[in-house]
Amino acid sequence: MVSIKDVAKRAGVAISTVSKVLNNYPNVSEETKKKVNEAVAELNFVPNSVAAALSSKQSGRVAFLMNLSSASQAIDEINMQYMAGTIGQAVEMNLDVITVFYSMLKNKSLEEVVRYLQSQSITGLIIFGISKDDKVLQKLIASQMFKIVVVDAPLVNESTSAIWIDQEQAQYDVAKKTITENKCRSILYLAGKKNGYVTEERLKGIRRLAEESELPLLVRNGEFSELQARNMTFKYARNKDVVVCASDLMAIGAMKALIEMDIFRPVCGFDGITLMGYAGKQMNTVRQDFKRIASEAVKELKRLLDGGAGQQIVLDYELVRIRYTDIIA
């Protein structure tokens, strides 16, 4: 096993200097940091605090990685539920947890991300909101250097578990309920972000329903944006019987547009956020228990840290019709 002494020798510095760099001590020159970090990468060195935790199967420190790039209050609501579930369960299980944001790792290489996580003594991660475009995180998962649980992405290996609901079936179910109730004969579907795992699965659900029901289907990208959904509704909804949205936020945008157009079209969403109750009309949606999902993710990460193998976990969901009276205190 590579030791800190080996790193010091490769970098041409003292062992104490390597320790200072790994622990982010101040007053270390950038040139020295570069030498040490290059030596760490070349030797694939794991700091003692991380190695000890792994070898003894102790949990070490857990990082909660989330994306706050969206300015939407609706997404904030989901993220806050995720945070509450993660932190609450981590405290209950006596795990040391820190929050890391995607922006903190932006433009970093795999080696730089690994060094950062190791410098924080992190042994496990829970990743929320990963997409196919997050190449470095994809590589991090594939490397199996850390125990990882991904939420809303079907990424599984020996060191990685995935947890989510059956996105395809949930989209199928809520759309079918709405279409059946209103005897619809054509569908406008507003999909989520391109290259998103949930977007891909939800698209499978609506396409399967349209094929089975022999209903014309028009798919447009709403990008999980209320504004984009509003614009797509103005443009296409008049010639369709129902607007099926891959998120509640888009459903709100679609419903507001329909009200302005002064036409009725049933609309359904996906997620079950509180804001849905203020849309002005009742809508069907898929309610996910985000707090529970995060809590189960922490439990699963602890199982991985204790030596378990990666697996996929599929939780349940509920079809609901959200009304204003359901959300007011």
Image: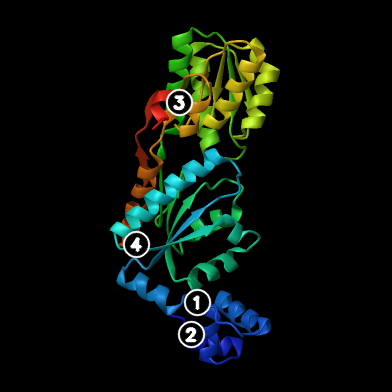
Q: Amino acid at mark 1?
A: Phe
Which residue is identified by label 1? 45
Please name the residue shown 54% across and 34% down the image: 200
Question: Do the numbered discs 1 and 3 sit on residues whose CB atoms are within 8 Å?
Answer: no
Q: Amino acid at mark 4?
A: Leu
Q: Is 107 left or right of 167, judged from the image as shown?
A: right
* Residue 28 in picture, x, y percent from top left: 61, 85
Earlier-in-chain disc, 3 versus 4? 3
Q: Residues within 10 Å of mark 1 (few under 14, many from 20)?
A: some
Q: Is 156 left or right of 44, judged from the image as shown?
A: left
Considering depth in this image, is 307 or 187 the residue closer to the camera? 187
Q: Quadrant of the N terminus?
A: bottom left
Which residue is identified by label 2? 4
What is the C-alpha distance between the residues marked 3 and 4? 36 Å
Residue 200 seen from this side: yes
Q: Residues within 10 Å of mark 2 (few under 14, many from 20)?
A: some
Question: Do the numbered discs 2 and 1 sit on residues whose CB atoms are within 8 Å?
Answer: yes
Which residue is identified by label 4? 305
Residue 285's disc number: 3
* Residue 199 in picture, x, y percent from top left: 55, 34
Earlier-in-chain disc, 4 versus 1? 1
Question: Do the numbered discs 3 and 4 sit on residues whose CB atoms are within 8 Å?
Answer: no
Q: Nearer the viewer, mark 3 or mark 4?
A: 3
What is the C-alpha distance between the residues marked 2 and 3? 54 Å
Residue 247 seen from this side: no
Q: Residues within 10 Å of mark 4 (few under 14, many from 20)?
A: many
Earlier-in-chain disc, 1 versus 3? 1
Please name the residue shown 60% across and 45% down the image: 70
